[in-house]
Amino acid sequence: MATNREPIFTHAVLVDNTPMPDHIPKVQEVGASSAPLTSTAFFIGDRCKPYNEDYMLCKHEAKGRGELECLKEGRRVTRCAASVIADINKHCLSEFRTHWKCLQNNNLELWHCRAEEKPFNSCVFEKLKLQKVIPDTPKGETPIHLRPATFK
Amino acid sequence: DLPPLGGYEPVQYKRNLPFRGFRPSYYLIAMGIVSAYGCYVAMNGIKERREMAREKIWTRIHLTPMLQAEADRDDVRRFWAAEKREKELMKGVKGWETGGVYNSDRYGFSGMALV
């Protein structure tokens, strides 16, 4: 019977630690875990929109060879996201921490943490001029992060 | 042991089944009002949930390029390491082409997963 047998070794996990070849420029990876990333996602989207769109377009047009051909765009995306997080750490660290710790305690559900989000968003807007925008909100309605809390 | 003075009270033997309740239309209207209110509350809840989902999806959209680029770098590093290993191992074999047997220039994964 041709049951689905995964092509993996089951007796050990073999980790390939070969580094990248030297002709590829090195980039400092973003080391953040999921809670800080969800917290800063909209600010990353705000500052890095052109780089993100460039990378996704490159991947789409490469049609199967995106991993190999879009490394440069990928480095740009990573550097931009890393710069956003570094700036937030420099200017708004305490509000950032309260927000992502709240998210971590609440299954990364943003609606639990509106009270912590408000001072964080205003701090980032003041210091870094980055705004949280939800693009496709229907016209005439306030975006959900600006509405009064329905329930906690 | 005689019956009480004045005798027993008269026994009710005729049927007594009075019509009770409001007009049926009133009941239907009340049901309709309660259902309508419930639908209104439910619809508002659904709209709110839609906006919450919208926010969550946009969070993920903004993070996808960064995470995908990181995964790509890892994949490419391992791909090139595997290719190099293959070249090294099959150096003496005549007629071996690294890159597999398929006539396609797509980037692809090898059979066994070497993490």
Image (cartoon, rainbow, N blue to C red):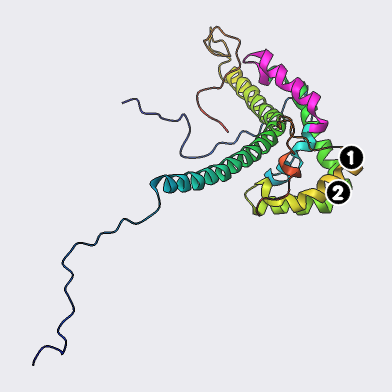
Q: Main secondary structure of the magenta part?
A: helix
Mark 1 residue element: helix
Of A94 and A145, which appears nearest the observer? Answer: A145
Q: Tell me the residue that label 2 is attached to.
A: A92
Q: Where is residue B64 in the image (x, y as percent from the top left)?
A: 68, 31
Q: Residue furthest right?
A: A127
Q: Position of residue B67 (x, y in %)?
A: 69, 33
Q: Residue at x 46, y 38 (%)?
A: A10
Q: Is residue B65 above or below residue B9?
A: above
Give me the chain letter of mark 2: A
Q: How crowded is mark 2: few (under 14 residues within 10 Å), some or many (20 or more)?
A: some
Q: Is residue A99 above or below residue B94?
A: below
The answer, for residue B58, to whether it is visible in the render is yes
Quadrant where the C terminus of chain B sits is top right
Asked if marks 2 and 1 touch (Cβ < 8 Å), the reply is: yes
Relative to residue A52, is residue A127 drawn left or right? Answer: right
Labels 2 and 1: the sequence-earlier one = 2
Relative to residue A28, is residue B88 drawn left or right? Answer: left
Q: Residue A49 lies in magenta, yes or no? A: yes
Q: Picture quarter containing residue A67?
A: top right
Of B97 and A77, which appears nearest the observer? Answer: A77
Q: Is residue A54 above or below residue A145?
A: above
Q: Tell me the residue that label 1 is attached to.
A: A128
* Res A105 label: none
Q: Magenta part of the protein: which range? A: A46-67
Give me the chain letter of mark 1: A
Residue type at the position of mark 2 = Cys
